[in-house]
Amino acid sequence: MEYKNLGKAGVKVSRICLGTMMFGGATDEKDSIEIIHRAMDDGINFIDTANVYNDGESERILGKAVKDRRDKCVIATKVCGGRGDGPNDGGTNRVHIFNEVENSLRRLDTDYIDVYILHRRDYSTPLEESIEALNDLVRQGKVRYAGCSNFYGYELAKSLWIADKNNQAPMSVVQPLYNIVNRDPELELFPCCQEHGVGTMIYSPLARGVLAGKYLPGQAPPEGSRAARKDPRMMVTELREESYEVAQQIKPLVDDHGKSMTQFALNWVLANPIVTSAIVGPRTMAHYEDNMGCLGWEISQDALEKIDQLVPPGEHTGWGFNDPQYPVQGRPRKS
């Protein structure tokens, strides 16, 4: 297993990060623990979860799985999502962050979190308040590094400026969506990370299964897939015919390399030198084993150039597509 520093931080993490969103939900506890142990035996030391994954079950199962080897893994968990009906039961305000860090520590059965990540921007809370709260947790020893997810480039830059101005813990890592059919981070976010030494842990490197080749243009999604289960985020983000077509067009490139679609898509993400780690989210051991085949080889330069022709750098498939959860901000509409 290859390891990289988490940006300019000293901690080293595996190029593959084990995502646990399926654990405690589609994947039962027994199978989840087996996958976690196998991943750690294979050299993976970076594991991602969140307080909202399967109503906290993901964190609980992870904590149980690593109890006897806690010092061998770097655990990242996240805060923002709602955990109740109260006015402060969600977001990144100081109250919710302080409440949820205690809940995550309890479920993980640990006394520290390696990387604590703001899951998304909470526009009802000043960024200064969120960063101060993270800094206090670092000073208390409950958190070792701060991070953010789903931030725009300017929001990451502002976060770094706030922390630097106030001598606070900086964002050590950002977690964006990035894959062959969603290359938007290459435009501003990744250059910001490179300039300021911020690590990157990529989520949805397979475009929620689209780049595994399971969805075909003009056909119903296969039984058991996220689209067939009507996964809310899947339904509004990745169900684009243009993405299905790109997945089919790269198949000959995949075949030329003698790899699976999944392995090819993951390798493409890791080939970007700005990427620290790619998150894989296996539902089964077979999925995990297939994912790991992305390591130890390189995509040819010719294939990389052909991908650039299909989806140019900084672009995404689907003319006019924008994720409704993260809208374009440069032309506000009248309310």
Image: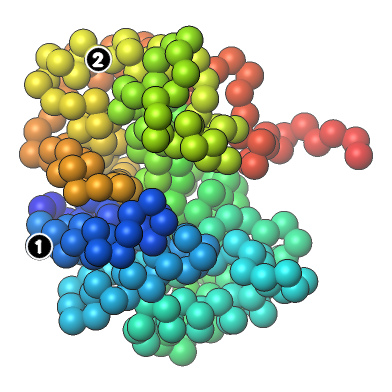
Q: How is the image coloured?
A: rainbow
* Residue named by callout 2: 251
Of 330 and 277, the residue lying toward us: 277
Looking at the picture, which amino acid does disc 2 mark? Lys
Of 53 and 254, the residue lying toward us: 53
Residue 270 appears at what percent x and percent y?
Answer: 25, 39
Mark 1 nearby-residue class (10 Å; few <14, some 14–19, many ≥20):
few
Q: Secondary structure at mark 1?
A: helix
For this view, does 210 lie left or right of residue 67?
right
Looking at the picture, which amino acid does disc 1 mark? Asp
Q: Quadrant of residue 88?
A: bottom right
Q: Which comes sooner in the sequence, label 2 or label 1?
A: 1
Residue 80 appears at what percent x and percent y?
Answer: 59, 64
Residue 331 appears at what percent x and percent y?
Answer: 77, 32
For this view, does 329 lie left or right of residue 313?
right
Which dot marks residue 146? none
Vertically, is 44 above or below 108? above
Q: Can you name the residue that lies furthest to the front here?
A: 223
Of 192 and 256, the residue lying toward us: 256
Give the spatial CA distance, label 2 vs label 1.
31 Å
Q: Secondary structure at mark 2?
A: helix
Q: Quadrant of residue 142?
A: bottom left
Vertically, is 98 above or below 187? below
Mark 2 nearby-residue class (10 Å; few <14, some 14–19, many ≥20):
some
Residue 65 appears at what percent x and percent y?
Answer: 24, 72
Q: Quadrant of the C terminus?
A: top right
Q: Is residue 111 visible?
A: yes
For this view, does 49 lie left or right of residue 293?
right
Which dot marks residue 41? 1
Vertically, is 230 above or below 38? above
Q: Can you name the residue that lies furthest to the right here?
A: 335
Which residue appears at 35% of the width and 18% of the height?
Answer: 247
